[in-house]
Image (cartoon, rainbow, N blue to C red):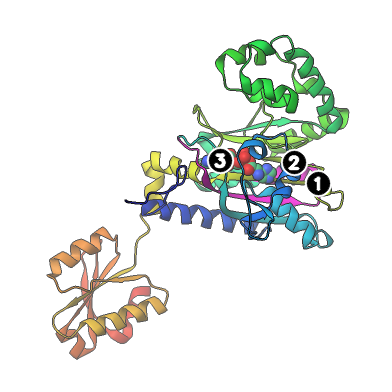
Amino acid sequence: MEIKNVKGTHDIFGEETKIYDFLIDVFSHLCQRYGASHIIIPTIEHTELFQRGVGEGSDVVRKEMYTFEDKGGRLITLRPEFTAGIVRSFIQNKFYANDLPCRLFYHGSVFRYERPQQGRYRQFNQLGVEFLGSDNFLVDVETISLAFSFLKELGLDKNIVVKINSLGDLETRNRYRQALKDYFAQYLPDMCEDCQSRYELNPLRILDCKVDADRVYIEKAPSISTFLSPQSAQRFNDIIEALKQLEIPFEIDHTLVRGLDYYSEIVYEIHIKNANEGAIGAGGHYSTLIEELGGPKMSGVGFSFGLERLLSLFASKSDLASKVVESKIDIYVMPVGEGVHSQALKIAQYLRENNISADIYLEKTKLGNMFKKAQKRNAKFALIVGEDEIKNQTVQLKNLSTSEQKEVKLSDILKTLKE
Ligand code: HAM
């Protein structure tokens, strides 16, 4: 029987892989311009890291982790997100003893046992940043600016909306949690099962419920904005002013609460305008996570994009996709005749060694077929290597957009191509 992929996973190949690589390339270069360095952390961590880091009250830890006991009896989890692992590494490798904030970026697979549906997988990929070790509100702003610049470079900035909210400090959240419990108590028997369990575990998450019948109650719930401590309100205002200065468009959404327990102060999500699908990226500030995981009392802030959700945007916008997929190769090498193939291969190797992308037709066929192939590969030039050319140490070079063709000495190829 044929073996299929595991439910909720998927293969990425062909043009999609080109866009995937392109996204990572654009993101990595941008992060480097922001002074961030690449960090690669293990896919597996001790389960306790996520229990303590992401929080026992979150859906991710309660229902969605891929957890197993290894042969040594350790409880291990496939990472359901990056932030906790990055913070673990920050503490373990004492990055906090260096220049702060420590700016890190990452990409890779994450695993969540969710119900698979459009844009929702059990193994998916994230790319993101964590800026650690500073409580300055401008560091929060910098991460939003980085996320926005990324979308701008991709030409997506006009299609998106950045939603922001403040969850305030611990005291704010405790007071707000109680206010929500008082308010929802009267409606709870009529609300969905998820809301009923969230009521005890994390009443803020009730605000996230998508069930239409529950929205009626949620819309009239008290707003966190009236519970913010003076310091948290000031911090949120400062961030708003800085975003305006940087001309980053945003919307304040006081129902935005996020599903992971480590956040405090600002949280944000990036959505596609007028689309009901989930966020393409999300993040926020965490002031106690580093300390809770055994590190010094320091804050961090970061975000992650879902790569598959970005990929699907490219798939639905052919102009975006063609920008990436149209990556041309420089030369299509065409061996014509007997005994020329190994020489042609040598020329292709020489070109590649000199940073010129070259493809070569290795089967024996008519020249016309080779031109068709070169067109398909979007080659800029055809380089024809025939028996006479080999004797004379020359090649025929044809510009495939102007159809101009000329004979070039083998020793002059690089010079001619540069011209
Ligand atoms: P998150 O909201 O759980 O945040 O995930 C971030 C992004 O990953 C989402 O906005 C979405 O694009 C994508 N995503 C989440 N679940 C799935 C899924 N099942 N299938 C496909 N894509 C998905 C975090 O993971 C935080 N660690 C973000 C962060 C970084 N906060 C601070 N630093």
Instruction: Give, as a three-letter code, the residue at label 1.
Output: Ser
Q: Rounded to the nearest whole Å, what is the CA distance between mark 2 and mark 3?
A: 25 Å
- Which badge, 2 or 1, comes first in the chain's sequence? 2
Residue in view at x 34 percent, y 74 percent: 417
Residue in view at x 50 percent, y 38 percent: 120
Rendered-image quadrant of the C terminus: bottom left
Q: Position of residue 285 (x, y in %)?
A: 74, 41
- Which badge, 2 or 3, comes first in the chain's sequence? 3
Left or right, residue 404 beside residue 272: left
- Which badge, 3 or 1, comes first in the chain's sequence? 3
The crowding category of the residue bearing disc 1, from other C-alpha atoms within 10 Å (few below 14, some 14 to 19, many at least 20), is: many
Q: Rounded to the nearest whole Å, what is the CA distance between mark 2 and mark 1?
A: 7 Å
Q: Which residue is mark 1?
A: 299
Which portion, as a residue range, is magenta? 118-145
Instruction: Give, as a three-letter code, the residue at label 3.
Output: Tyr
Q: Nearer the viewer, mark 3 or mark 1?
A: 3
Residue 113 got which mark? 3
Q: Is there CB contact under 8 Å for labels 2 and 1? A: yes
Residue 368 got which mark? none
Q: Position of residue 71 (x, y in %)?
A: 63, 60
